[in-house]
Amino acid sequence: MSLSRVKRLICLALYYGFTRHLPEHSLPRGKLWLLLRRWTAGPTLRHCGKEVHINRGAHFGNGAALSLGDYSSMGFNTRIIGDVTIGSYVGIAQEVFITAYGRQLSRVDMPMALQGKIPDDPVVIEDDVIIFARVIILPGVRVRSGSVIAAGTVVTRDVPPFAVIAGNPARVVKWRKPPRPEWIEGHVTPLAGDHLKPQP
């Protein structure tokens, strides 16, 4: 067993056994708790950027498929499953669920529990995104830079840049800057109304 693998295993044990359960960053000595979580979780991730904030209860499996960019955060009790890339300056609030994991469900001649998983459909969250509490992001979604996802939103399609989205299923409810026609092409989150279409 290589030295780097041993280090990852030790860090995983320390994170899930101890530092994951330390108090939230808003409580006394919060910076210390964040630092300890970053020290133990960081080496387990595929990539861990500078000054990341990993808050109490965050869960990301063994970390090998998660990339977390500079100055990004994972909120209290956030859960991330599978191949997920998070850019820089991304704020993720509490109890957000992001998954790239899928199951085989097509066969009807055997129980679904026995059909196994399908390959991860990667999730990408670009730079400068805010994701509020209890959002669910499903496999294959790309969240473009500058977008905001309102609390409780269920995201099943790509999110255009500089969009504010909300609802279940998600809809674009506002733009942070005037939209371009190419932003709403393809498999993207639908608009909440015609007044949100790009103006000629």
Image (cartoon, grey):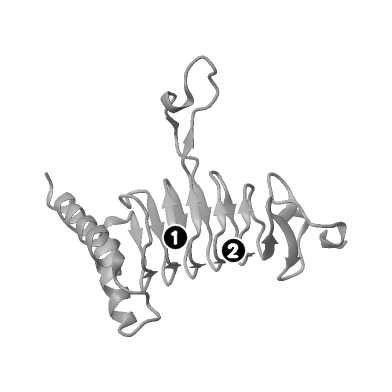
Q: Where is residue 196 in the image (x, y as percent from the top left)?
A: 82, 61
**How far apart, in angstroms, are the residues tagged by discs 2 and 1?**
21 Å
Disc 1 crowd rating (10 Å Cα; few below 14, some 14-19, many 20+) is: many
The amino acid type, in three-letter code, at marker 1 is Thr
Position of residue 2 in the picture relative to residue 40 (left or right): left
Q: Earlier in the sequence, mark 2 or mark 1?
A: 1
Q: Residue at x 23, y 64 (%)?
A: 18
Residue for point 67% across, 57% down: 160
Badge 2: few (under 14), some or many (20 or more) residues near its Cα, within 10 Å?
Answer: many
- For the N terminus, the quadrant is top left
Q: Which amino acid does label 2 sit on?
A: Ser
What residue would you read off at disc 1?
78
Q: In this view, does 110 lie to the left or right of 18?
A: right
Tell me where residue 167 appears, x and y as whole percent.
Answer: 69, 57
Q: In which quarter of the image is the C terminus?
A: bottom right
Any mark on residue 55, and which? none
